[in-house]
Amino acid sequence: MSADWAATVSLSVISRSYSDCTMDISSVMMAFWAPFLLLHLGGPDTITALSLEDNELWLRHSLGLAVQLYLACQIIRRSWIGTPLNVLAILVLFVGVIKYGERTWILWSVSSEQFRDSMLRDPDPGPNYAKFMDEHSSKQAEGYEVSVEPLIEAPAEVEFVPNAPKNSNIPNATILNTAHHFFVNFKPLFADLILSYLDRKNSQSFFQGCTWEEAFDVIGYELGFMFDTLYTKAIVIYTYTGSFLRFFNLSFTSFIFVAFLVVDKQSTSPVDLSISYLLMVGAIVLEFKVYKFCIDMLQSYQHSNLQVIQNDLKMFIFNHLWRKSKQASDFIQGCKQASDIMEYCKRLCAQRGDQVLQERRCFYEIGWSVEVEFDQSILLWHIATDLCYYYDVEKKPVLVERPECKVSKALADYMLHLLVNCPFMLPSGIGKIRFQDTCAEAIEFFQERKFFMEGDLDQNKKLRVKACTTLIKVNTKIKPSEVKGDRSKSVLFDACRLAKSLQSLKMEETWPYEKWEMISHVWIEMLSYAANQCRFNYHAKQLREGGELLTHVWLLMTHLGISEKFQIAESHERVKLVVT
């Protein structure tokens, strides 16, 4: 962040150090450094922006390039005495302009407005209606019987993802090829554009036929490509133009280094020489690093936040969304009205646990918990999940070892993390206020019972069990809102009501197992709802932090067709005139 400031100050100091007196080798050496400052302002190829907002500052960088280029040119002009160092300084200036200009151009390319415009397809006015009607009227005027009949064009076929040849030098070459294929087609999502009907068919065809491991691997690499596009120089590096610029820059920089070794530097101080060598070696290292950058970036992305989530969770998420995708495909195939399809897609994306409760015939008892504001629903279910979990730790420990229970606990913790640390990724609400008020009520409750004097609640599992058992025993026959009013936004004892209901909904012996299966599905629906509601730019913003599970789920849902970001249907019908 201080690079621009440091370079500007350095160039100004060098410029002010000159006077009209005779130039010596030391002054010429300082002039040799000036274009290197411009070169290093181009930055490494592995990063162009620290955040999405940096891409919007391309105009400021353009102005900085113009000002600093002017200063560098003035320094070279004023120090010109016809020595080889003067010539080398001009060569460095060429390389510096290319590097800094390249970075500025990339920032402009991925700025929100330009990025969106670059993915708009060519305007399509459709068949010439006016011409068609003129011909229709003309034929009628001539006395012909004129009618129209459909002219149906063959619909486009589903495009199969090509397989990449095996390559021992590139790990997971086939997955990389598949991910890049979908990245190219689904990139408009990150510009808030809709995708074509054919894109939906293509991605559904692949993702409905793959395993959960393949699906999450492809999505991980796909988001890696997106990170490279938004935050690095990848969109230029891996093109013919980019390859030429790399060859040009590396060749010139290497030539300058070799030439500097042989020019006369007898009167140059050791400090000046050290600075010069450091600048040149740094420039060469920056050029060499790019050749190992694509694969390194993609491999490091696989160690993002998603990897700390258990495989069970990814499998549960994929299976749940796969079933919804299949149901959607069946409905759309049998539906003729575009309005019905649109309404169905909206309902599918709006489910946040209510559908699960209805399928389990529990909506009458606990449906209220998913009909409140979304942030309130997250807190209710998080606390209720914890209460049920630690209750079963004490009473039925075999239950907490089941995958459904682990998935429920992991998602409950993750959704609370989003509510507290990334509220911008969730639908707007007063989640932080509810969280603070709920914490305050919990502290008051435990302090009254001198709970915190007995140990550390975060470290002592037995104490957690005791705390949850104490909470769940509180009499909640009267609703908390009737006693306390609505000044406090705490949901602590409403969550206790929910936990009690979950424990006693059914009396069958299998209910404790079914309970955790239902809770896990409710959480997956909440996660899916949040992923679909989150704005595209917030998904893109979190890529610089390693990527959120929410973003992976959002992209998986879109690939499976569970999204409103598609054309609902694509008609290939046209009409033609029939003259008799």
Image (spheres, grey):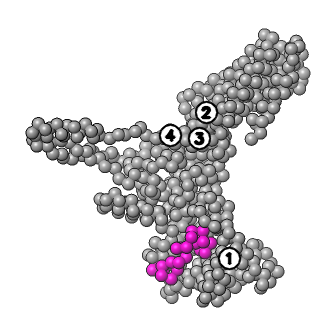
Give, as a three-letter code, the residue at label 3: Ser
Q: Which region is colored magenta?
A: 360-381
Give, as a three-letter code, the residue at label 4: Asp
Label 3 – label 4 distance at C-alpha:
10 Å
Closer to the camera, 502 or 447?
447
SS for dot 2? helix
Label 3 – label 2 distance at C-alpha:
10 Å
SS for dot 4? helix
Residue 76 x, y percent position in the rendering = 77, 18
Q: Tell which circle, 3 or 2, labels the residue nearer the N-terminal end.
A: 2
Q: Tell which circle, 2 or 1, labels the residue nearer the N-terminal end.
A: 2
Q: Is residue 225 left or right of residue 200?
A: right
Residue 570 x, y percent position in the rendering = 34, 50
Rendered view: 176 above or below 534: above
Q: Quadrant of the C terminus?
A: top left
Give the mark count: 4
Q: Does the magenta-highlighted stretch encompass residue 206? A: no
Disc 2: which residue: 105
Do residues under tags 3 and 4 come within 8 Å of each other at their CB atoms?
Answer: no
Identified at 82% across, 80% down, the residue is 453
Disc 1: which residue: 488
SS for dot 3? loop
Give, as a three-letter code, the residue at label 2: Trp
Q: Which mark is residue 111?
A: 3
